[in-house]
Structure formats: C-alpha cells, structure tokens
Image (tube, rainbow, N blue to C red):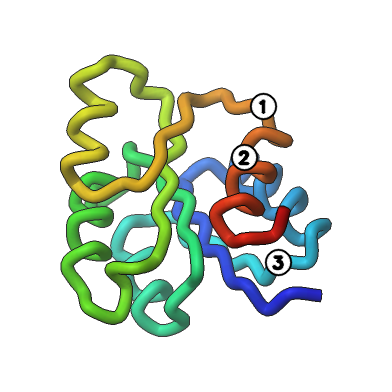
C-alpha cells in the first residue's frame, strides 16, 4: 500500500467512480469532490499528491480552481491533470496557462489515466 493521495474534482458521478476504482485498485487513497469550491476545500485540508480536475464544474470552474491551487504555497507542487471534454487548442492552452500539468480529453481510456497518475506519483 502506498500513502499517495489523489483528489478527483469531477461533477459526473460515473466518471469519478471509474477513476476512483482504478486508483484504489492501485492502492492509492482517493477522495472525490463534485464542485470547484468543495475541491479547493478538500485540497487545502488534505494536500493531495495529485488532482484530476474537470473544467466544467458547478460554481467555480476548473480553470479558476487550477489557478487557485497553483497560487497556494502548500498546493503549488500538487500535480494537476485536467480531464475534460473540451478539445480545442484554445481550451487546452487556457488550462495550461491556469497551471495544469497535463491534459486528457474525455472520454479517456481509463487505463491511460491510471498509468499517467502512477507515472506522476513515481509508482511505475
């Protein structure tokens, strides 16, 4: 078992559950937030090693969540992987400008997400 923590910020219960199961099967500690505000609060309280972040969230959108995460000293080293249906160059560029470390277009191949997360966490 690893004590690496992942926070999934995703308003789709189905998408969040798929990612959660894959990561828990890898021995990762997983928490889910369904809004941007809830995600920021959980990230501040538990300082995850990695966050998967949807861009289209109720309330605070994913771009602003990412900016706020990267602006906080305790969270700016947390890896943020955006997982979004937005597939235009402009949207992807905007996510990177907000501080995202990686970008995956939905619907992702679930094993790709698990592999990327394990690589970022040094769990080859």
Task: List the single residue furthest toward the bottom.
Answer: 45
* Residue 91 occupies quadrant: top left
Please tell me whether mark 2 sits on a helix, a strand or a loop. helix
Please tell me whether mark 1 sits on a helix, a strand or a loop. loop
Q: CA distance from mark 2 to mark 1?
A: 7 Å
Residue pointed to by mark 2: 113
Q: Is residue 38 visible?
A: no
Identify which residue, 76 or 86, lies in the foreground. Answer: 76
What residue lies at 40% left-to-right and 53% top-to-bottom? 80
Q: CA distance from mark 1 to mark 3?
A: 19 Å
Q: 26 above or below 44? A: above
Mark nearer the N terminus (1 vs 3): 3
What residue lies at 55% left-to-right and 54% top-to-bottom? 120
Residue pointed to by mark 3: 28
Residue pointed to by mark 1: 109
Circles 2, 1 touching at the beta carbon (< 8 Å): yes
Q: Is residue 62 left or right of residue 42?
A: left
Q: CA distance from mark 2 to mark 3?
A: 13 Å
Mark nearer the N terminus (2 vs 3): 3
Circles 1, 3 touching at the beta carbon (< 8 Å): no
Image spot of residue 114 (x, y percent): 68, 45
């Amino acid at each position: 078992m690893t004590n690496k923590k992942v926070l999934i910020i995703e308003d789709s219960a189905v998408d969040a559950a798929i990612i959660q199961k894959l990561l828990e099967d890898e021995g990762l500690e997983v928490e889910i937030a369904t809004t941007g505000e809830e995600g920021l609060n959980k990230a501040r309280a538990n300082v995850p090693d990695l966050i998967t972040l949807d861009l289209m969230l109720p309330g605070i959108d994913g771009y602003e969540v990412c900016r706020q995460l990267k602006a906080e000293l305790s969270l700016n080293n947390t890896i943020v992987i955006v997982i979004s249906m937005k597939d235009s160059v402009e949207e992807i560029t905007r996510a990177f400008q907000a501080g995202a470390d990686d970008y995956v277009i939905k619907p992702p191949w679930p094993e790709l997400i698990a592999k990327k997360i394990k690589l970022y966490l040094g769990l080859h």
